[in-house]
Image (spheres, grey):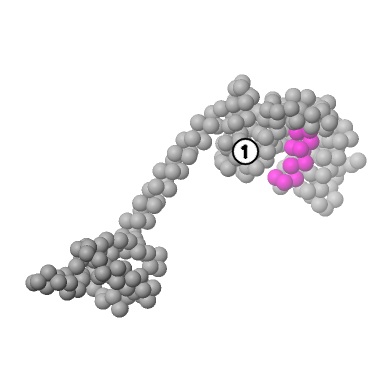
Amino acid sequence: GKLIHDLEPELHKVLALVTDVFTHSRLQTMTGTISPNERTLEVRLVRVTDDGGNYAGMVVLFRDRTEETQFRTHMMRAEKMAVLGELAAAVASRLDPDEDVRVVSAALVALESVSDPTLAARYVALVRKAPGGPDESDAEWEARLSTGVNWATTADLAYKRLAGLAGPAAAAGIRELASDPRLNRVLRLRAVRDLAQQGNRNDLDLLEDMLKKEDTELRGAARYALHGLAPEPVSYTH
């Protein structure tokens, strides 16, 4: 119900350009969409002629399609997320310790941007597949990581995915790995140190117990975690 000159200045400029093109063409109608001030307007221009068929002006019709466009965008986004969720679930199903290591590794790579806490238990199971055991040295571990896709590289990536998750399931997974004396030594040390990042003071008893039972390197990792959880003096002993 407004004249063109009564509309917003930026909309007026766009319409002025469009009407100039329309005026000098032979088109009878022209339809387009413009988006002033985060709105979506459908604009339809209809040529008006006199009795002799000569150009006499035009009629400009507007239709506000903002809500329709927003709804369509929302639905497209929802459908995309649903498809991505289905794909992620299909990929996650391959995170099985009994699966071929190359398939598991590819699934872990594909899940890089997926932050699903329900995957924590699957990641923990894959970390446990790491070879080497409690006597693994750093040099031996690095050698395993340099020989292509294997259970060492896959377990290492699984731990990174676990550590990248948030929430109690991920924290419980890291705590479970930190307390496992049969786990690959390098990964267990990493889990012990990462307890500090979880910020759960309920882990203090576990860490203090490590100071009494574990070897020098694990005690050092436990002290590091204890300092992160409780910077003030605590009751542990050297």
Can you name the residue that lies furthest to the right here? 238
Residue 64 sits in quarter:
bottom left
Residue 71 lies left or right of residue 112; in this view the side is left
Assess whether residue 143 is covered by the magenta stretch: no
Q: Position of residue 177 (x, y in %)?
A: 72, 32
Magenta stretch: helix, strand or loop mostly: helix
Percent position (x, y) of residue 205?
A: 78, 39
Asked if residue 196 lies in the magenta stretch, the reply is: yes
Residue for badge 1: 169
How dense is the environment of label 1, judged by Cα within 10 Å: few (below 14), some, or many (20 and up)?
A: some
Q: Nearer the viewer, residue 130 or 48?
A: 48
Magenta-highlighted residues: 186-198
Amino acid type, label 1:
Ala
Measured from the top left, where is residue 158 in percent x and y?
66, 34
Frontmost residue, 236 versus 114: 114
In the foreground, 27 or 40: 27
As helix, strand or loop, the secondary structure at mark 1 comes to: helix
User: Which residue: 27% across, 61% down?
Assistant: 31
